[in-house]
Image (cartoon, rainbow, N blue to C red):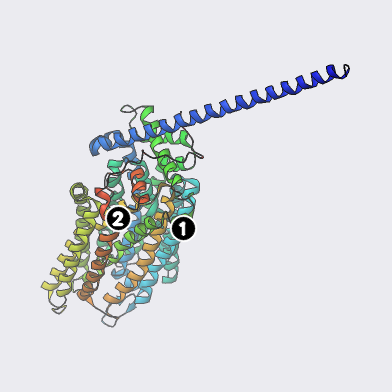
Amino acid sequence: MASLTPASAPADNDNSNAFITLTKAETVGHVEDMEEEMGEKELRQQLIMDARDATQEEMAMGPWASLKLYRKAVMWSFIFSCSVLMDGFDSGLLSAFIAFPAFQKKFGKPTGDGTYQLTAPWQLGLSNGAKVGMIIGLFFAGFFTERFGCRWTMIVGHTLMICFIFIPFFAGNIQTLLAGEILQGIPWGIFQTLTTQYACEVAPIELRYYLTTWTNAQWLFGDLLSTGSLRGFLQVKSQWAYRGAFALQWFFPLPILACCFFAPESPWWLVRKDRAEDAVKAVKRLIHTSDAGDETARKTVQMMVHTVALERKGRSGNGRFLDMFKKENIRRTEITCVTWMVQSLCGAGLLNYGVYFFEQAGLSTEDSFDMQIGLDCMGLLGTLVAWFTMKWFGRRGLFLGSLWIMVLMFCIIGFMGIPPSTNKGASWAAGALLIFSKFIFDSGVGPVVYSLVSEIPSARERAFTIVFARICYNTCQIWVGELISYQLNPTEWHWREFSAFFWAGSALLCSIWVFFRVPETKSRSFAELDTLFAKKIPARQFSKTEVDPFDQDVNMDGVHFIH
């Protein structure tokens, strides 16, 4: 027994030491976990504090102070939005060519009275062909933007545009022209959503409305330039009357393409890609650094990081196409899509066919083009007016008010069709009312839609939601374009001014939907909008509901902190 005791004692001592050593390791690990947890808690608190500070500072600045600080962002947004000017120019050419004598003679058929007309099927083919190309371009834009960012997507779009212009320029028959319109539609589709998304993501809260609605003004600028160019080519009787107009398209993409190589990437896209440090660098390029230093850029990006983390907590998706149809996003997807469709269904298609409408109402070709120029100028004036009236009426108020006035104007235009087309007084009156309707449209529905479709989606789903909404709009435009072609074409229904009655009814139905479904987004941060949608606040209560997106915890999984 004595010999066994010493042997067992060391064994017991070894076990005891092993136990003590293990306990110390566990304790050290537990302390490290606690320190890590406390460190993450402090980082979370710092993130929320920085995000709150950045949001409050943006809201307190006001438009003029925001413009002073973010004047570089405004410049880059304007350069990107010039792509929509090109889209408006090209689309305006196609709409006006239908009533252009040299184009009608080359691609149309004789009507028996010495004039030529494009048949309704080919009118639809050219218009719908471009829209098919736009839908292809939109799908491309959605996936390419999410993968490579706004800047490179825009560079690819302008490169394609330069190449595809050659096809309609050299087109010798209408089939080749159709192929050219389909291919040109691809970069047009890219421009239609990318410019709005970029403007929304580089602008502070108080400038979002102005930069996103400027897209509408650029489209009108393009349409005005196309109408003015064709008005100047009216006296040219050869094929260069329309080829010269096609050649002008090359003027736009080259300088925009050169600028895009030097443009900063969207900081929101960089945050979604967990590149927070790069996002800080991008914000520094968007602000005037003499007025704000590194701290402002850091806090601004922290606000973006907080918003993305908040959406992750609400399971708004992982930035995939199908995520916009999830339960958490479906309401926002519906509002975004139908809002853009309202821009087509409220009768805007009739305004876009202004030259053709005026001709069928009894005006000469020269007078019709002059009236179209007046139409575009009133549209531009309306967009500028909307910048000021939004301060009092908000997005929702302008949207609803302009729709109700358009219902009234279309009813009056319809009654102008009662006198025969030989009555020039009634034709001029209908033209004047259509011009005023254009002013109403572009002081409300036109620009407000661009603001709403960029603000309603969640940050993680913005690219895909805007693209899908524009696809819905273009699909709707195909149907609207077909309907208007048959309504106005003298070889088909030939409704003339009576077609306005149909669009008055359509605009009324649109206003009912807007009243119940579209919320007010004025002066709301993206985090506040996320919270309002998460709480399922009714659209009519958005402007009256106070929320604090910073009083709730966020999902920090995968969040990249900025120290």
In the rendered image, which quarter is residue 326 located in?
bottom left
Q: Work out whether residue 457 or residue 381 is closer to the camera in this orientation and state it.
A: 457
In front: mark 2 or mark 1? 2
Identify the residue under disc 1. 139
Q: Residue at (40%, 31%) from the top-left corner?
A: 298
For residue 4, above or below residue 176: above
For residue 244, above or below residue 546: below
Of labels 2 and 1, earlier in sequence is 1
Q: How crowded is mark 2: few (under 14 residues within 10 Å), some or many (20 or more)?
A: some
Question: Which amino acid, mark 2?
Answer: Pro
In the rendered image, which quarter is residue 502 located in?
bottom left
Q: Which element type, helix, strand or loop, lies under badge 2?
A: loop
Say which mark, if any, is on residue 476: none
Q: Looking at the figure, which quarter contains the N terminus?
A: top right
Residue furthest bottom as drawn: 112
The answer, for residue 285, to whether it is visible in the render is no
Q: Work out whether residue 563 or residue 431 is closer to the camera in this orientation and state it.
A: 563
Q: Residue at (68%, 22%) from the top-left corner?
A: 20
Q: Residues within 10 Å of mark 1 (few under 14, many from 20)?
A: some
Image label count: 2
Q: Where is residue 261 drawn, in percent x and y?
A: 44, 41
Q: Which element type, helix, strand or loop, lies under badge 1?
A: helix
Q: Is residue 122 left or right of residue 396?
A: right
Q: Where is residue 433 drawn, in percent x and y?
A: 15, 66
For residue 325, above or below residue 54: below
Q: Residue at (41%, 71%) from the top-left corner?
A: 174
Question: Which amino acid, mark 1?
Answer: Phe
Q: Where is residue 475 drawn, in percent x and y?
A: 39, 66
Q: Work out whether residue 356 or residue 26 is closer to the camera in this orientation and state it.
A: 26
Disc 2 to disc 1, C-alpha distance: 31 Å
Identify the residue under disc 2. 538
Q: Where is residue 557 drawn, in percent x and y?
A: 51, 40
